[in-house]
Amino acid sequence: MSHVAKKQKTNNNNNMASTTLQSSNGSWVPYDSETDFPIENLPYGIFRPTADAEARVGVAIGDQVLDLSVIHTTGLFRQLGSWTNCFCKDTLNDFMGMGPKNWNAARQAITELLKAGNATLRDNTALRAKALVPQAQVTMEMPCNIGDYTDFYASREHATNVGTMFRGPENALMPNWTHLPVGYHGRASSVVISGTDIRRPRGQLQIDATDAKKGSKFGPCRLMDFELEMGMLVGPGNKLGDPLKIESADDHVFGFVLMNDWSARDIQKFEYVPLGPFTGKNVGTTISPWVVTTAALEPFKCKTSAGVQDPEPLPYLRDPDYRSYDIQLKVELENEKDVPKPVVLSRSNFKYMYWNHKQQLVHHTVTGCNMRPGDLLGSGTISGTERSMFGSMLEISWKGSNPFDCGNGISRKFLADGDRVTMSGFCQGDGYKVGFGTCEGKILPAHTD
Ligand code: CA
């Protein structure tokens, strides 16, 4: 795989070898109620136990990774059938393409192995030492080969903010917006794993902000931005010519990751007419390494902020279970130079989706477009109703007119060189969290040659 692998950050260096294996919550693996990865979560990822080892499939549990390739090769999955050799692969694509029957069987078997009272792995010291690897020690890789990436614009709060800024409150939403999930085909090659640095891009910048006829000049982006999004990863696809149906759309959704869709606002401004986003949006898109499955998210389905859709969508988009997920999202910024301690830029929630993930997927295929396992669909920037909930600097600084106060006399309109943006998210259960880990990246200075 060509992308840059990065060390997974962890705050907890709890080491199995030196820890008493007492039951905590529902698992014999020790963790506390604040962990992102309790037994209720079990997200999948691709990891290397050591830098030179082969990449394979793992599941996060507490501050450990359960190596599923070890579980497969030692025969502990034998009751499931031979298909569990997909856990020895260096991507999740094969497993993603198998669909809910195998996903559920795997989840059940993993839950059984890890649950409090099950001695199979817990009391087998040698096997346990091989199968459980501290997250602090592993290198995370991209979870799958992303064949295609599409980005939506589906948060009403976000679309209203941006529309108000550029067209005024009367025409904030374009006439099509409440009739279909607006989106564009993105660029899969520049999707990267959390921890990858992002180079400030250079490109064509409009000389006169109010008159495009005056042309452009070449230079570094001055309006560098992040976009707080969730990324949906597709499971089994559909044949070219055969659209997906809303009733069974969930069977085609493997899970979700956090996503930062880096954006060069000034490059975007001059180039986007009339075909839409291009080089201002292919600079890099960062995703978190652990894929949280729809099974883990099921208890956290919730009403969208809209509640009901008005006007009622056309029949193919009418979702009999029109909901999103209650995922609390946070964006933090830090910079070694002038913002040494992270400041919270935003707290939003995945419920601020007007067009939910199923409607996005179904609309994407309405003309017969074929989806494939591992395809990535970005939700679009997720903004709430107030400034403290906005999902981009464009909105937080209101096009640069209202700088964000980082404290100590430091402020930001857009991102500066050296800024590290960290996204995190979780669902709050009763005494546990289903979390996503982090999605982070740092802005490097533009090339000068
Ligand atoms: Ca985006």
Image: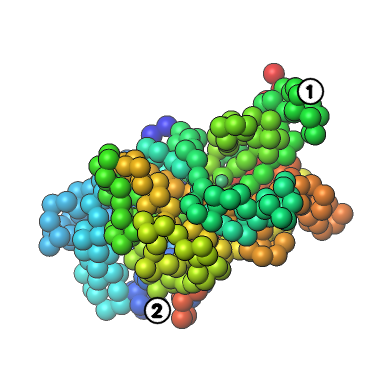
Pick the front one: 298 or 6 = 298
**Residue at x 49%, y 51% (from the top left corner):** 181
Q: Residue furthest top?
A: 449
What residue did someone put label 1 on? 214
Question: Which residue type does callout 1 highlight?
Answer: Lys
Left or right position of 76 against 233: left
Pick the front one: 80 or 131 = 80
Q: Determine whether the beta carbon of the residue marked 2 sits less than 8 angstroms from the nearest atom of ligand 1.
A: no
**Residue at x 35%, y 46% (from the top left corner):** 365
Observer able to see residue 4 = no
Q: Height in image: 346 above or below 163?
A: below
The answer to which quarter of the image holds residue 149 is top left
Q: Residue furthest bottom?
A: 430
Observer able to see residue 218 = yes
Q: Position of residue 361 (x, y in %)?
A: 39, 51
Number of other residues with Cα within 10 Å of mark 1, as a class: few under 14, some 14 to 19, many 20 or more: few
Q: CA distance from mark 1 to mark 2?
A: 64 Å
What residue did someone put label 2 on? 25
Left or right position of 103 against 386: left
Q: Dot 2 lies on which element?
A: loop
Question: Which residue type does callout 2 highlight?
Answer: Asn
